Amino acid sequence: MNTKMDVELRASGEDYLEAVLILGQRKSQVRAIDVAQYLGYAKTSVSHGLRLLRQGGFLSRDADGYLYLTEAGRDMAERVYAKHRFFAGWLIRAGVAPDIAEKDACRMEHAISEESFQSLMQALEYPQKTSTDGLS
């Protein structure tokens, strides 16, 4: 059986974890069909992806089919969702239409490393003065 260390999450896996997190905040119980409907994917594709995430230690499922994030799954989902909110917010503030900003943020959240994301967040939250500040 795979452990969380053996499973490399792809964008779709991150999307599934993010969806379980978001849906879990909206309603107390989440099933595979809820994730499929939320993402607009076929239930068979989502079921396969969720099974891999369970095998990797990111999700658990009870006897009634309800999904729960493990500690590792919650950590990953929260990191992906934070990236999504960050990029969507900045794009919208920059004048991008919200629907386009959401789609672009979804792609960006998967492409950026954690190190680059943290640096970007810090730079935008606490802009550093450069040697050219104040020069005309």
Image (cartoon, rainbow, N blue to C red):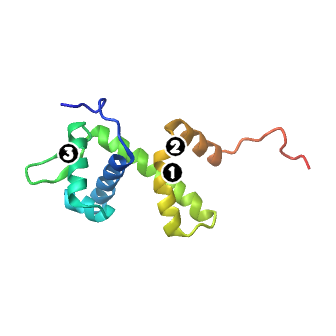
- Residue name at image x 32 percent, y 61 percent: 39
- Give me the C-alpha separation between circle 3 and circle 1: 25 Å
Q: Residue furthest right?
A: 136
| Circle 3 Cα neighbour tier, 10 Å, few/some/many (<14 / 14–19 / ≥20) | some
Image position, residue 104 (x, y; %):
51, 58
Screen quadrant of the N terminus: top left
Mark 3 belongs to which amino acid?
Arg
**Helix, strand, or loop for circle 2?**
loop
Mark 1 belongs to which amino acid?
Met
Label annotation for residue 112: 2
- The answer to whether 88 appears left or right of 47 in the picture is right
> What residue is shown with label 1?
108
Q: Are marks 3 and 1 in contact (CB under 8 Å)?
A: no
Image quadrant in which you'd find residue 120: top right
Image position, residue 131 (x, y; %):
83, 38
- Give me the C-alpha separation between circle 1 and circle 2: 6 Å
Q: Residue furthest left?
A: 63
